[in-house]
Amino acid sequence: MINSKLIQKNKKFFNKFAGSYDIKIFKKWQESIRKKIIKEVAVKRNSKILDTGCGTGELLKQLLLEKKNLKLYGIDVSDKMLEVAGRKLNNKANLKLSSVEKMDFKNNSFNYVFSEDAFHHYADYDLAMKNFYIILKIKGKLVVADVDFGFVLNKVFHFLEPGNNKMHSKKEFIELFKKYGFKKIRQKKINLIQVLTIGEK
Ligand SMILES: C[S@@+](CC[C@H](N)C(=O)[O-])C[C@H]1O[C@@H](n2cnc3c(N)ncnc32)[C@H](O)[C@@H]1O
């Protein structure tokens, strides 16, 4: 059973936070992280891409700047975060109010599924992984970037951040990717506190 209480908690927290989420002081730093992720993935032209837990749409905006004729989709459980994303992206991405646990996309339809800083919020990350695999095309890629502060600080962050379900270690991410059938798994530290894991269907 999906923990809908946790989904509601996330919705409430990020709805409150939406207006101030794109704080200017972190913007440059976050932008540089997104550029690194996109560079690492080397997205192909004309791809269909889903950003899960897309928040205010910053990764989608960055992907648009690639000018590769991408078909962009974003889902999130927070309607207010999506409102900010919608204003920013001006109809250049299809945004949907949806959880990763209950998505309404065709099987084998995406070339890439992204998740940036959202994975630790998912109420049922096993179900999310299963769904990601199903909606990806053969050879499609799952790209998960998430924070990792190390064992002790992860526990503190988990305790302090509202809607935080579980912090995954690097090893746990690799195990999850394997468990759900992903191949050619690779992992990279993007900076001191961010880990990128990529796998292929
Ligand atoms: C820390 S924010 C990250 C937003 C964006 N990806 C970024 O990097 O700026 C986490 C996002 O995940 C969303 N979220 C939380 N649980 C979710 C779920 N089960 N399904 C889809 N989105 C979810 C939240 O509403 C929030 O917008």
Image (cartoon, grey):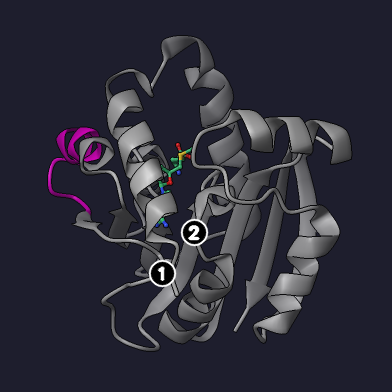
Q: Does the magenta stretch include residue 134?
A: no
Q: Residue at x 74, y 30 (%)?
A: 156
First reached walking from the N terminus: tag 1 or tag 2: 1
Q: Residues within 10 Å of mark 1 (few under 14, many from 20)?
A: many
Q: Which residue is drawn at 52% across and 66% down?
A: 124
Assign a secondary structure to mark 2.
Answer: loop
Q: How many labels does the image show?
A: 2
Drawn side of residue 6 relative to residue 177, left or right? left
Q: Mark 2 points at which residue?
A: 123
Magenta segment's dominant SS is helix
Q: Does 64 appear above or below 149?
A: below
Q: Is mark 1 within 8 Å of ligand 1?
A: yes
On-image quarter of the N terminus = bottom left
Q: Position of residue 149 (x, y in %)?
A: 78, 34
State the CA–CA distance, disc 1 to disc 2.
Answer: 8 Å
Assign a secondary structure to mark 1.
Answer: loop
Q: Does 151 appear above or below 153?
A: below
Q: Name the residue under label 1.
A: 101
Q: Does the residue labelled 2 lie within 8 Å of ligand 1?
A: yes
User: What span is colored magenta in the figure?
Assistant: 83-93
On-image quarter of the C terminus = bottom right
